[in-house]
Structures are given as C-alpha cells and as structure tokens.
Amino acid sequence: MKFRFFLFYFLLAFVGCSSSNDDIEKPDGNKNEEGNVTVTGDKVTINPLAYDQAFRNPMMGWRDVFSVGLDPIPDKYPLPFGSVYKEYIPWDRIENVKTDGVDKVIAYSNHRWEGIEKKNIKVIPRVYIHWMGTPTVSDPDRLDGIRFPSDISYTQEPGTPYPMIGGYFDPTFQDRVKELVRKMGEAWDNDPRVAYIEMGIIGQWGEQHSPMIGTYWKPHDADVHEANKTWIPGIEKTLGDAFTTAFKNKKVMVRYAYDFKDYEFGYYWDSWGIAEEDVRGYEEMMKMGDRWKVQPIGGEICWNWGDFSRYSSLADILSNDATRKKIIKQIRDLHCNHLGYFSYARPEVDFSQEALLKNAQTVQKALGYRYILSEFTYTKKIENGQAFDISFKVRNEGSSPFYYNWPVEIMLLNKNTKAKVWSTVLNNINISQWFPGENWDDTTEKYTVAPQTYEVQRTLTLDKNLAADEYIIAIAILDPAGMVPSIRFATKNYFTGGIHPMGYVGVGKDISKYGIASSAFNNMYTDLTLHYEVD
C-alpha cells in the first residue's frame, strides 16, 4: 500500500547564503567576487553572480501532499522548497448527488485552501473515488473508502479492488463524469490557487488503474483484460474530451503516457526511480518527445514497493548515490517539474541531518525551472517623460519551463526605503518559452544541448515626474493574481518581497556610482513574505 498520509516538513533552513560587505561596483569592468559592473557610453551593464543554493519558486520543486481533513497547513509553511501541494479530493465531497451545483465544489475548495495565497502556495487537486479502508462517518473529510456520489450504487467483489456491479460500470457513470468535470472546470480553471489538475477519478487513489483507462498495458490486478472489469470501455474519450473542454487555462496531467495519446496532457508518474516502472513509466514518457515544453511532468517517489522496498524512507533513497543519480537523470531526461514526497510525519526521519538536506537541495536544483539572470543593461541617466533603454539576458538551467506566461515588471525604487515609485510591465514576453537544455549527459551532469540565452530589449518611457535623484532599477516576475512579485531569478541581487535590484540609476541628474553593495541584498531562501491575491 502506498502511504498517502504524510506531509512535507522541513524544520530548519540549512545552508545560508553569505554575503560580503564589499561594493559590487567596478566601472572599469574588472570582475571581483561580487560580480561585474561595466559603464560604456550612456549604458550600465550589471553581471550579477548566480545564487547557488536551492530555493522555492512557484509551481515547481519538491511537492507536498496533504491528507484531506488530517493535515492542517503548518504555521511555518511555506517550507524551504515547498511551493505546491497535492490535494486528494473525494468525489462525494464536491458532488454527492446529481443536482449539486458548482457552488459545492467552490465551497469545499474554500474550506480546504483557506489562506494558502498568503503563503504563496498553490494546489494540484486530484479527485478520486477509491481509497483503501472504510469511510469514517464521524469525520467526512477523511480519505478512506469508495467515494462514489450517493446516487451511484455499486457492489464490490470481495478480495478485489473493483466495484463489480454499478459504480464505474453504471450506465449513467460516464455522463456523470462529464458533469463533474464541467463543474470542476467552472470552479478551478480560473482559480489562482490551482497550479495544475491531476485528472484522477479512475482507479485506486485516482491513479487510473484498477480499473484502467484502456488495454494498452496488462491489468494491474488480473492476468488478462476483461471489459467492464479491468478497464472501462469509452472512458478515455469521455475523460479526454471533458477535461479538454473544461480546462482552457490550467494544465491537466494524466497517470500514464500510453493513455490519452489523442490529447495533449501532462503526466503524473507516481513511481519515479523504481526499476519495475521504468518501462511503463519512464520509457513511455520518453516516447512523447517535446510534450514537456507545453505540459508539466510530475509525480512522486514512493519507497515502499518494488526495488525501493529496501528503503525505509525517502531520506534513505536520496542517501544512495546510484539511486539519487538515477532519479536526477530521469528528472533531467523527462524535464520533470515537481516531485513528492518527503514523509515529514515519520518519527524515524531526522530532519536536522545535514546529508538529507544536502541531497534534497541537489534534487530541488534539478527540478522545474531555474532562471539565471546573467546580464542587465540600462540607460545610466533617465529624464522624466523621455525614453530610455533596458535589456537583460536569462537562461534556464533547470529541467522544465514555467508553464504559464506571467508578466515581467521593470521598476524604480527609492534608494533608501526600497519603495516602488514607478513601474511598467513589459509587453510581448512569454516566459513559458524560456526553455532549459536538452539531452542530459549524466557523466558531465550537463545537457549536451545547452540552454539558450534569451535576450529581452525594450525602450521604455518614464511617464511620471520623479524628483531628480538617485534610484534603484529593479526587475520582478509577477503573479497575475494581484500583480505581485513571485517568481525569483537565481541571482544574489535580491530584496525581500521578490524584487531583484540591478543597480543605481540617475533620474534628472548625473551619478557616478551604479553598483549596489552586496550588504544591501537579502537572502531569498529565508524570505517568507511572498504571496498572491484571491478575489
């Protein structure tokens, strides 16, 4: 049995990022340990040093898992790497009878996700029908049991995972699925709290086996396939069409790459690194080519079956060099965006262990996107009402893109208070097309096709009258939910709140100093102030 009741929890932040008190300004262009500042004509170019440590960013990295009704969001959340968690949702909690409306889906979502926007975390919901165990009447939020709506009857054959009469094979079931998915889309497709959607619904834990979507692969729990027992005829088209129609904005993920080949979905593979799943999981996803460029790949590492049965925890898995490297290779090959899960509730795991935290950081740096801001150039003196130039270069040293096109903002800050005094959102930028490299070589630990460096150049206008003074020019990537800074570049030039200061700039006056002292920077790893807004 898979253990689904455990919550990510890091108790300590581990390796802090130290900074020097030296100034990073070097107008002659000579590098020092803090970076590089070059002044050429009327332009200033900043080459900030990369931030080497792992850190959290939205909708990527180590993913948490919450058990419905059991695991409250910890007071110290967000965790060092956690920015997204998976929520298992029983069908009967969001629709118990056919006449239940979308308001029930929204009410349950609000019940479970209250306040997550304040901690800058987002959720991956997976609706399911079948869990192990028996439902607890006194606690309706519990996961256990078979959770069909009350007006879909079933009879389960003893000793099997299949509802043999009714249930999945009820004549009304697939029409009910269509209506359920329509309500889910109406509730979640524009909900900023939702990162991605795991299709779920079918099979134990919503893993789309027992019964299965189709007959491409042999049954999980039988020797041969039998229609309306080991698989559900027609369910692939029903689900594929329903989710495609319902979710125009959110990315949808399915369990196996060999299902839904007529649809463009991402994947949640729940057995990363396990040898018994290499063929049906890893190799099938590798056949999908560039799907990762537009759809997220995720899942979990499970340590209690197959060749991973020799491990007692994820800490044990990550401590094995060969196993950890295999997982990282699969992350890099498949361009994995997020993975669960640490077992933060198990007492045998000591989270103060330096090795565990070091290994977790290594995997975190491979997961998802990692934007390196290698160069930022701007006009050194700006006049009110006049045009000025900015440009920057960025490359993605992670494994996946960011899957939504969030806006990039250029701003001027008061040099003393750091308050924003002017800003503009850049047009015609699509950060979801900042792709990583390809063709991972685990010997050199690099992609043989190096990540492209993307250059953005814009001419802007200071359309506000600012007092003649020295300001800080900065950049940020915003969450559209509230238009607040959220995604961070992996650079040491950082102010608390998701802002990356680049250098000093004169407005209506000449200045001579452009580099910002590193002592003014904050450590993004320890910044817990990020958030977004929900209407």
Image: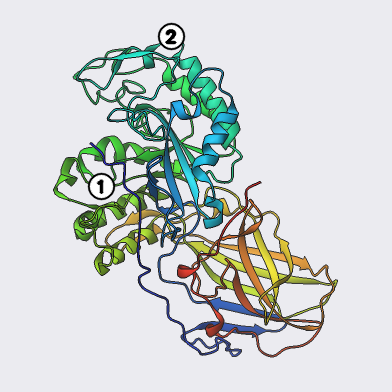
Q: Which residue is the site of mark 2? A: 171
As drawn, 527 above or below 299: below
Q: What's the amino acid at mark 2?
A: Pro
Structural crowding at the residue carrying mark 2, measured as other residues with C-alpha within 10 Å and reported as few (<14), some (14–19) or many (≥20): few
Give residue 357's position: percent from left, percent from top: 30, 65
Residue 212 visible at all: yes
Is 480 or 513 nearer to us in this picture?
480
Q: Residue furthest left?
A: 310
Q: Which mark is residue 273?
A: 1
Nearest-to-viewer mark from 1 and 2: 2
Mark 1 lies on a secondary structure that is loop
Mark 2 lies on a secondary structure that is loop
Is 497 or 136 nearer to us in this picture?
136
Residue at 41% from the left image edge and 62% from the top image edge: 80
Identify the image quadrant of the N terminus: top left
Q: What's the amino acid at mark 1?
A: Gly
Give residue 406's position: percent from left, percent from top: 61, 53
Quarter occupied by residue 459: bottom right
